[in-house]
Amino acid sequence: AALAALRSQPKGIPEAVARRMALCLVLRDRPACLELAAALERDPWRDLFLEAGLAKQDERGFRLSWWDRTALLVCLDRTGTRPLYIVGRRLEWTPEDRMPKYVAQGMARGARRAPFGLPSLRAAAEAGEDVLVVEGPVDAVGAEAVGLHGIATIGRPGAAGYADTHGAIVQAMEPVLDSLRACRLVRVVPDNDGAHEKDEVGRTMAARLVAWLRDRGCRAEVATMAALGFPDCKDLGEVAERRLSGGTPAGPTESVEGAERAPAMAEPAASGAPADG
């Protein structure tokens, strides 16, 4: 009954790509969200939904963390067979919205969130090809839809510095370092936000993550959307949407020469100390 309220994948993403990258379901509207919550409340395992952060129980009753039109993206393990967690992407979100674009599943008992798109990372590592590190799951799915490999950090790609051990993003990246080292190049891609100040913040955070990756033996570069060959697109999700709707944004850059390098001061020295002292 709950699945009857859902349709197969977000608009614009080919079903084959959606199934390869994640189990993608879309809640059509708020009534569909309420219908799914009612079905889960009757489920014999309802307490596990609460413990895993998939549902909430409060004065308003048993309910989900998602509302309105929402794409539910189930992050899969590297084999593409085992679900790890769920991210809700609100499809009616606008920059003026006071609520967040993504609603992440809570992590119980100290669990850590893995990057989204692990099947794509595995493919890139096994083929010795590039992998893009992007901000959101829809961007990672979009990268796959246009023939690239991508993983998402579910937040602005970045790190506090090359020696960061406490940040949520670097903790999520640590378990997949072997796969990242096997890739030809890890290209950290900040969103093309348009506003100069936001762009600078994104590129600075990306440079710090590049330094963190290099310090751990990965070949890594910062690559803007322009360097990838998509100067007029905000992110890879927009690239996929325009391509699949008949638009023709420029193709991806084949050579790594267009990638923007992290600032020298973000590079770790051979001794492990920061290059700028």
Image (tube, helix red, strand yellow):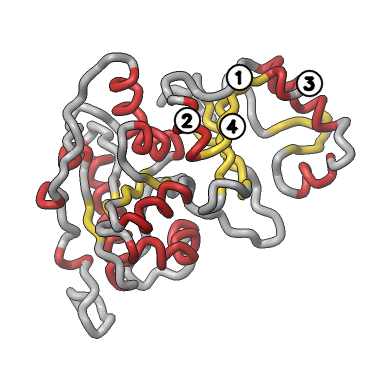
Image height of 163 relative to 234, above or below: below
Give the residue at mark 2. 16
The CA distance from mark 3 to mark 2 is 24 Å
Give the residue at mark 4. 72
Give the residue at mark 3. 1
Q: For mark 2, give the secondary structure.
A: helix
Quarter holding residue 127:
bottom left
Q: Position of residue 131 (x, y in %)?
A: 32, 51
Nearer-N-terminus badge (4/2): 2
* Residue sitting at x 62%, y 22%: 27
Q: Position of residue 191 (x, y in %)?
A: 30, 39
Kindly indicate whether the residue at mark 2 contacts the one at mark 3 (C-beta within 8 angstroms). no
The CA distance from mark 1 to mark 3 is 12 Å
Looking at the image, is mark 1 or mark 2 nearer the viewer?
2
Q: In the image, which disc is placed on residue 7? A: 1
Nearer-N-terminus badge (4/1): 1
The CA distance from mark 4 to mark 1 is 11 Å
Q: Is residue 160 left or right of residue 195?
A: right
Nearer-N-terminus badge (3/2): 3
